[in-house]
Image (tube, helix red, strand yellow):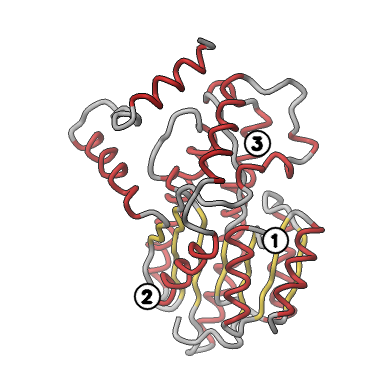
């Protein structure tokens, strides 16, 4: 993207983390900003802040897992600003534990937000952007889907999260290839961050009542929560830096966006496991003490 001034950004999960930082950058670049989030109070505060930076802001409360609500977001965006040039399908939730201990409610909630939320965004906004490109020679569009390094790896005790993020990577790569068949001015990107201080480890605060658990968390789920709390809060790369990486990737028309490039060594190991072929490499081979601690904790030793 060479010219952002006057263009429109649509950002889900916009009240915190990557979404809020991306909204701030959009405002500084002179864009209109459609800020969508499930938390009404946090959304109102974030929208007021971004509006204070000089942007025209459309706050929109929604649950991205609900198709009708994302469709309404698309209609509201077009009515206020026209087709967006930047769509950031960023809203997501985290959940961990041994994969067979995820309940039906866990699967429905996490798949609904992490996977179907992105699918709804792609389904609603891609046609709007392609239509705009067909009538406006100056139009350029970018769709960025937030996955995770968990979409390229399979860390233990993170089953449902891994599954959804792998699906987002596959969806994004397919979107990239499909767009290349029909357009040279609408582009796809996938963001694969590692542990960054955001609110992802506090996702339970936004779990809808219909997906809440009656039973207490299992041992593995409590361990996963504790590990997530520690890893996320101690991350050194900031959400602001990651949001800037996203804009850099759009400026350079670069598909993959990584927050921690050094972590790609683990991806290479996984691909070598597949190509050799050999059984999956122990993820704790470099830190066996951590693996031993996790196994002991899961066994209650």
Q: Nearer the viewer, residue 210 or 246?
A: 246
Please tell me whether mark 3 or mark 2 is closer to you in this view: 2
Q: Residue furthest left?
A: 276
Element under disc 1: loop
Q: Is residue 210 above or below residue 298?
A: below
Q: Earlier in the sequence, mark 3 or mark 2?
A: 3
Mark 1, mark 2: which one is toward the viewer? 1
Q: CA distance from mark 1 to mark 2?
A: 26 Å
Crowding at dot 2, Cα within 10 Å, few <14 / some 14-19 / many 20+, comes out as few
- Helix or strand or loop: what does disc 3 sit on? helix
Residue 202 versus residue 56 in the image, above or below: above
Q: Which residue does the numbered mark 1 point to in the structure image?
A: 15
Q: What residue lies at 56% left-to-right and 22% top-to-bottom?
A: 220
Q: Is residue 168 above or below residue 15?
A: above
> Which residue position holds label 3?
108
Residue 67 at x, y = what percent?
Answer: 69, 53
Q: Residue at x 50, y 31 (%)?
A: 159
Lower position in the chain sequence, tag 1 or tag 2: 1
Q: Quadrant of residue 214?
A: top right
Figure quadrant of the N terminus: bottom left
Secondary structure of residue under mark 2: helix
Q: Where on the picture, by quarter, is residue 228?
A: top right
Q: Residue at x 34, y 55 (%)?
A: 261
- Name the outermost residue toward the top: 301
Return the disc, 3 or 1, that comes first in the chain's sequence. 1
Query: Tag on residue 252?
Result: 2
- Residue 25, given in percent of the width and then of the height, sits at 57, 75
């Amino acid at each position: 993207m060479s010219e952002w001034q006057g263009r429109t950004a649509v950002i889900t999960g916009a009240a915190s983390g990557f979404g809020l930082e991306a909204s701030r950058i959009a405002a500084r670049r002179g864009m209109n900003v459609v800020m969508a989030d499930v938390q009404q109070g946090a959304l109102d505060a974030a929208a007021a802040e971004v509006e204070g930076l000089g942007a025209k802001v459309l706050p929109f409360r929604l649950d991205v897992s609900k198709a009708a609500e994302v469709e309404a977001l698309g209609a509201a965006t077009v009515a206020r600003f026209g087709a967006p040039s930047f769509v950031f399908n960023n809203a997501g939730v985290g959940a961990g534990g041994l994969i067979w201990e995820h309940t039906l409610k866990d699967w429905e909630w996490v798949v609904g937000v992490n996977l179907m939320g992105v699918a709804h965004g792609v389904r609603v906004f891609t046609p709007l952007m392609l239509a705009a490109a067909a009538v406006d020679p100056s139009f350029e569009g970018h769709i960025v889907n937030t996955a995770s390094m968990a979409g390229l790896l399979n860390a233990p005790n993170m089953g449902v999260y891994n599954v959804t993020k792998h699906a987002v990577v596959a969806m994004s790569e397919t979107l990239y290839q499909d767009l290349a068949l029909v357009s040279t001015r609408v582009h796809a990107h996938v963001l694969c961050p590692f542990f960054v201080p955001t609110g992802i480890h506090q996702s339970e605060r936004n779990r809808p009542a219909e997906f809440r658990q009656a039973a207490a968390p299992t041992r593995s789920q409590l361990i996963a929560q504790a590990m997530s709390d520690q890893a996320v809060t101690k991350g050194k790369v900031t959400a602001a830096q990651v949001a800037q990486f996203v804009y850099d990737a759009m400026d350079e028309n670069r598909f993959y966006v990584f927050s921690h490039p050094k972590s790609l060594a683990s991806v290479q190991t996984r691909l070598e496991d597949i190509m050799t072929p050999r059984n999956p490499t122990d993820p704790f081979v470099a830190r066996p003490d951590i693996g031993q601690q996790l196994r002991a904790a899961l066994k209650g030793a």
